[in-house]
Image (cartoon, rainbow, N blue to C red):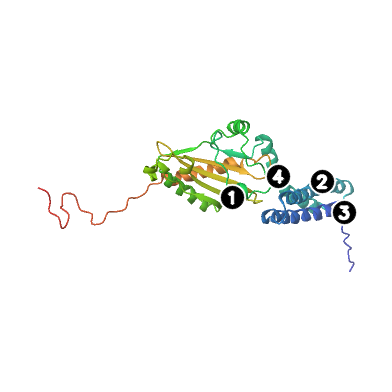
């Protein structure tokens, strides 16, 4: 019996290296994401690590295409390795590429507010922000014009609910979103109402309800600061929200989406029907209450 020798085609070295590099880029990306979310390094070095990992994914794709040309000309093996490298590298850079296109279309702003004229102020959060973070001061008319052009639907929420009800609804939504609350000050009655005899001037700022919280992005866990202001009006309550990114000149629309979702959730709570509590010893119509004589 004659044994046939099966000669295996040599695998392209470019194909093998492209797969190795793609797998290394995948592992490095996961490590970089963990570093960014944990805050073990400063944001800039952590993002540099992530950028290097994604760059390796691009190199892996280029090597895979080079391996394809070699395989086509020389007829060697390595097609599966090259294809797998392209899939892994493409999966790594697909979302960053989408964010790049999104950043090109959106304005370069990182601070969104429903009240550009008198934006809610960061007080407690201002003392927690790192020195290399974005300025805490609102950029004024320039940012307001860019915001209105890109997000014309971002407006304050006017409701007929009381300031306390609006404040509790906002606090409930923030707690449900698991944002870290830094400071919370419920709305107070004006000083002139609490102490009439003191005849002190009314302080509008003292009556505002304030909630300062820190939200985090889903994937990288970037910290973004949020402040909610609840202010009494003649018709009810006005709710203003401000959301600002700590790093980067373009928030990719995340702050506008956060403000929009927060106000919508607060409105859902305030507009939900509240069943009235049933009064004890409810008396049927036309029947006198027990222990009392009916009026004749």
Mark positioned earlier in the residue sequence (2 or 3): 3
Distance from disc 1 to disc 4, alpha carbons, whole Å, reads: 24 Å
**Residue under pointer 1:** 214
Which label sits in the foreground, 2 or 3?
A: 2
Mark positioned earlier in the residue sequence (3 or 4): 3
The picture places residue 238, in percent across and down from the top left corner, at 46, 39
100 or 107: nearer the eye?
Answer: 107
Mark positioned earlier in the residue sequence (1 or 4): 4
Which label sits in the foreground, 1 or 3?
A: 1
Distance from disc 2 to disc 4, alpha carbons, whole Å, reads: 17 Å
SS label for mark 4 = helix
Which label sits in the foreground, 1 or 2?
A: 1
**Residue under pointer 3:** 13
Q: Residue at x 56, y 49 (%)?
A: 213
244 or 233: nearer the eye?
Answer: 233
**Residue under pointer 4:** 96
Which label sits in the foreground, 1 or 4?
A: 1
SS label for mark 1 = strand
Q: Residues within 10 Å of mark 3 (few under 14, many from 20)?
A: some
**Residue under pointer 2:** 62
């Amino acid at each position: 019996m004659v044994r046939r020798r099966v000669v295996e085609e040599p695998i392209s070295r470019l194909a093998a290296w492209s797969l190795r590099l793609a797998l290394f880029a995948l592992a490095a990306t996961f490590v970089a994401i963990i570093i960014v979310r944990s805050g073990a390094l400063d944001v800039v070095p952590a993002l540099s690590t992530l950028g290097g990992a994604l760059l390796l994914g691009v190199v892996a794709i280029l090597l895979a295409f080079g391996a394809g040309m070699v395989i086509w000309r020389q007829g060697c093996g390595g097609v599966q390795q090259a294809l797998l490298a392209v899939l892994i590298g493409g999966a790594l850079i697909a979302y960053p590429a989408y964010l790049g296109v999104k950043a090109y279309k959106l304005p370069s702003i990182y601070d969104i507010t429903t009240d550009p004229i008198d934006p809610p102020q960061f007080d407690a959060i201002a003392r927690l922000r790192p020195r290399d973070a974005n300025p805490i001061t609102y950029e004024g008319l320039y940012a307001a014009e860019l915001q209105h052009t890109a997000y014309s639907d971002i407006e304050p929420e006017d409701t007929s609910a009381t300031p306390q009800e609006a404040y509790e609804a906002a606090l409930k939504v923030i707690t449900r979103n698991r944002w870290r609350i830094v400071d919370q000050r419920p709305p107070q009655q004006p000083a002139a109402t609490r102490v009439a005899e003191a005849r002190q001037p009314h302080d509008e700022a003292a009556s505002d309800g304030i909630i300062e919280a820190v939200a985090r992005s889903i994937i990288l866990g970037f910290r973004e600061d949020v402040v909610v202001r609840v202010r009494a009006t003649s018709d009810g309550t006005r709710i203003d929200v401000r959301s600002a990114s700590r790093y980067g000149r373009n928030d990719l629309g995340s702050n506008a989406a956060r403000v929009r979702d927060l106000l919508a959730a607060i409105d859902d709570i305030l507009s939900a029907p509240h069943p009235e509590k049933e009064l004890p010893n409810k008396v049927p119509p036309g029947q006198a209450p027990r222990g009392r004589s009916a009026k004749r």
